Amino acid sequence: MDGVLSALRAVAEVTRLRILALCAGGELSVSDLVDILGISQPRVSRHLKVMVDARLLERRPEGAWVFYRFAGSGVGRDIARGLLDILERKGDALTSETLRADHGRLLALRTERAEAAMRYFGEIATRWDDLRRVSGVEEAAETALVERVARAGATDLLDIATGTGSVLVRVAPHVGHVVGIDRSREMLALARAGLDRAGVRNAEVRYGDMYSLPFQPDSFDLALLYQVLHFAEDPARVIANAAGVLRPSGRLLIADLAPHGIEDYRVRHNHRRLGFSHGEMEAWCTRAGLTVQETFDLPGPELTVRFWVAGGPPGS
């Protein structure tokens, strides 16, 4: 009962309702909320503390930043979702208009970031393969990736956010047909040239968005997210979309960075996330209907590359 009362008291304030509605759409930092709500950082932080204490939200530190998201479980989460559902169906005109305006500002913020990312990838396309080699174990990581692709015996493989297509060239000999997608046309031009140069005939690249894959369900035996998710605004959504195009026996192979604290990568390399823990990756895969079946790390001088192999329920 105390938990219920604490959660109800915590949302009995307009700004906290606005924060709750915004966090329902994914993780947000304090600075994100300041920009969207138009109030001071200390005020936002005070509201967030109350909501975390009431277990409506979860706090996730990452380097010098802190992100907030809906609680993963518990009475606080249930109250939050129920309250937002009521507001959506029966909220007064002023509340509904305020929440719609907040949502519009959130979409504008994400659009601005997506456009900045597109500019970044367009500008560095010709240097991408060198810039991506930040961990010091790239060769070992790509070798491990190829080994697992070869072991999978896939007929159809999807490489999401393929970049210059260097991974396609390496995995193509082990797969029947390979498709790479990317949102950067500069990257795609380099990928096509690279495939032609390597004489790869069983691969193609297409323009496509990792948040809205241009494929039907049951299209692929294997999907790759190789060093992609740390650029993603919403990694959970990317994983869910990847799972959605897999066949029942399909696998998702993720390779990314383990948690680190090198803040410079946010600015210099446009990283949205400073690596991933096993817990959050397993939670995202579970939510997407997948089970993590294998994990391993490749430690480097400064960074560790971490692998997750996920598929349907055991025995699928």
Image: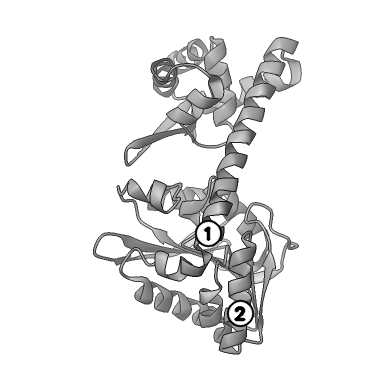
Q: Residue at x 66, y 17 (%)?
A: 98
Amino acid type of disc 1?
Glu
Circle 2: is it few (<14), some (14-19), or many (20+) Cα within 10 Å? some
Split into 4 quadrants, where in the image is the C terminus?
bottom right
Q: Is residue 293 above or below residue 176?
A: above
Q: Can you identify the residue that label 2 sits on?
A: 193
Amino acid type of disc 2?
Ala
Q: Residue at x 51, y 81 (%)?
A: 170
Locate residue 146, reporting x and y percent. 47, 79
Q: Secondary structure at mark 2?
A: helix
Circle 1: is it few (<14), some (14-19), or many (20+) Cα within 10 Å? few
Judged from this view, the residue extending furthest toward the left is: 301
Q: Residue at x 45, y 50 (%)?
A: 270
Q: N-terminal of the two: label 2 or label 1?
A: 1
Q: Residue at x 60, y 90 (%)?
A: 199
177 sits left or right of 174 in the view: right
In the image, 110 versus 152, the foreground residue is 110
| Of labels 2 and 1, the one closer to you | 1
Locate residue 218, reporting x and y percent. 71, 66
| Location of residue 251 by image quarter | bottom right
Q: Secondary structure at mark 1?
A: helix
273 sits left or right of 111 in the view: left
Locate residue 197, reporting x and y percent. 58, 86
Judged from this view, the residue extending furthest toward the front is: 123
Q: How many marks?
A: 2
Q: Can you identify the residue that label 1 sits on?
A: 123
User: How far, Cα to Cα, is label 2 from label 1?
Assistant: 18 Å
